[in-house]
Structure formats: C-alpha cells, structure tokens
Image (cartoon, helix red, strand yellow):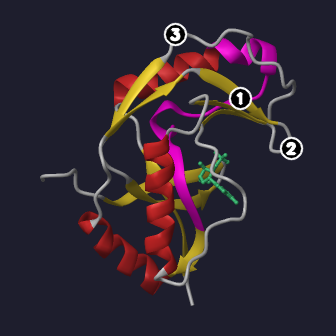
Amino acid sequence: MSTVRLFFALWPAPSLAATLAAWAEQARPSCGGRVMRTETLHLTLAFLGPVDAALADELAAATPERRLAPEDMTLDRYGVFGRQRILWAGPGDTPSGLQAAHDELWQWLSGFGLAAPPQPFRPHVTLLRNIEHASPPADAPAPLAWRYDRMVLVASESQSGGSRYRIVAQSRPQGA
Ligand code: 2AM
C-alpha cells in the first residue's frame, strides 16, 4: 500500500519567512551548514511520518474543520540540535497556547491511530542543516512577532537534492 509522509505545521507569511532567512544568513558564518530555502521555512506542530494514502486523504479532508486559536508568539533565540546538526530559531519557552494546540492536535490524531512522539515539544524553525559548529551568534536578531491563526497539513515528497513540501490542506481560521 502506498504511503504519504505528512506533518502539520505553522507556515510563516512571506515577510516573516524573509526575516527568518536573514536570521539564517546571520548565523551561517559561525555555524556553516546549508541554508533552508525561504519558501520552505515552517514550524512543525506534529510530524506524522509515512501514513497510508487512504488515511492521508481522510486527514486532508478533515483538516479544514479544525480550528487553531489565534495567538501571538515571539521568536527571540537561536538554538542548536547537536545530534541532528540543526540551527533553529524559536521562542525561549514554549508558549502555553502553542503547547495546547500541539496537545489538542495529537489528541485528535490519536483518534486516527497515530501516536505523539515521546519527546517534549520544542517549537522551532529549522534555518540551517548539516552545521559544522554549534556556535550561533551570541545575540539573536531583534525579536520576531508571529501571529498565527491556522495550521497546514504538508506532504513531504522525496526528490533528487532533498524534499519537496506540498501543502495539502489547511485549518480554517476561527470565524471563517
Ligand atoms: P526538523 O526541521 O527539526 O528536522 C519535515 O521533516 C518536518 O518534520 C521538519 O520540520 C522536521 O523537523 C519535522 N520532524 C519532526 N520529527 C521528525 C522526524 N522524526 N523525522 C523527520 N522530520 C521530523
């Protein structure tokens, strides 16, 4: 049976993504690594991994009925996942609204037989991959406000040179 690799994410507006790309450029001289393409920058809420195509269709059909409470979040720090050799941007502490959105999403997904990973949620936007040094600039750029009101369901498709992301559905903003 064919499978689709899926994840739910917050997707930044183009202006916010452009500012995050500047964060990546600022960190690259000290970290090395590969800059993510601006139009692919995102914050993963839930990584589902490969799911059966039929379930993928079901999730895509159900996603527009989901609601995400609109919240303001501030990205104000760089972070490093050493083992994965990732440099990321994120909020200092996980905002309670975002944690609740993550928990509710996994609660809903559990009804489809999907289980959350055991690790705690660490919201982040991956900026650089394959970094050579875990040494981001000491000072992050000016804090970045992100007001989100929806999540997107993304299919990650392998292609030569990496993954291609395709948005297959999105939740409807509250009141829409
Ligand atoms: P990352 O940027 O920290 O690698 C698509 O791969 C998205 O799902 C990325 O944002 C990735 O986070 C996230 N993700 C979370 N868990 C993952 C896993 N086990 N394998 C691949 N991607 C994962």
Q: Secondary structure at mark 2?
A: loop
| Residue closest to the far front | 96
- State the mark number for residue 79: 1
Is tag 3's residue or tag 1's residue first in the polypeptide sequence? 1
Is tag 2's residue or tag 3's residue first in the polypeptide sequence? 2
- State the mark number for residue 97: none
Q: Which residues are magenta?
A: 26-48
Amino acid type, residue under disc 2 in the picture: Arg
Decide which of 64, 109 is in the foreground and name it.
109
Residue at image x 46%, y 82%? 111
Decide which of 68, 158 is in the foreground and name it.
68
| Residue closest to the far left | 176
Amino acid type, residue under disc 1 in the picture: Gly
Judge whether 41 appears above or below 20 on screen. Answer: below
Count neighbours of disc 1 (C-alpha within 10 A) and say few if under 14, some if 14 to 19, many if 20 or more. Answer: many
Instruction: Give the alpha-carbon distance from disc 1 to disc 2, as whole Å.
Output: 12 Å
Q: Which residue is mark 3?
A: 142
Q: Secondary structure at mark 3?
A: loop
In what quadrant of the picture does the N terminus appear? Answer: bottom right
Q: Which residue is mark 2?
A: 83
Mark 2 Cβ inside 8 Å of ligand 1: no
* Location of residue 12 in the rendering, given as x and y in whole percent from the top left corner: 40, 35
Q: Secondary structure at mark 1?
A: strand
| Residue 41 covered by magenta stretch | yes
Residue at image x 35%, y 71%? 60
* Location of residue 150 in the rendering, given as x and y in whole percent from the top left corner: 31, 49
Instruction: Give the alpha-carbon distance from disc 2 to disc 3, as whole Å.
Output: 27 Å
Count neighbours of disc 3 (C-alpha within 10 A) and say few if under 14, some if 14 to 19, many if 20 or more. Answer: few
* Location of residue 7 in the rendering, given as x and y in whole percent from the top left corner: 52, 60
Count neighbours of disc 2 (C-alpha within 10 A) and say few if under 14, some if 14 to 19, many if 20 or more. Answer: few
Amino acid type, residue under disc 3 in the picture: Ala
**Nearest to viewer (mark 2 / mark 3):** 3
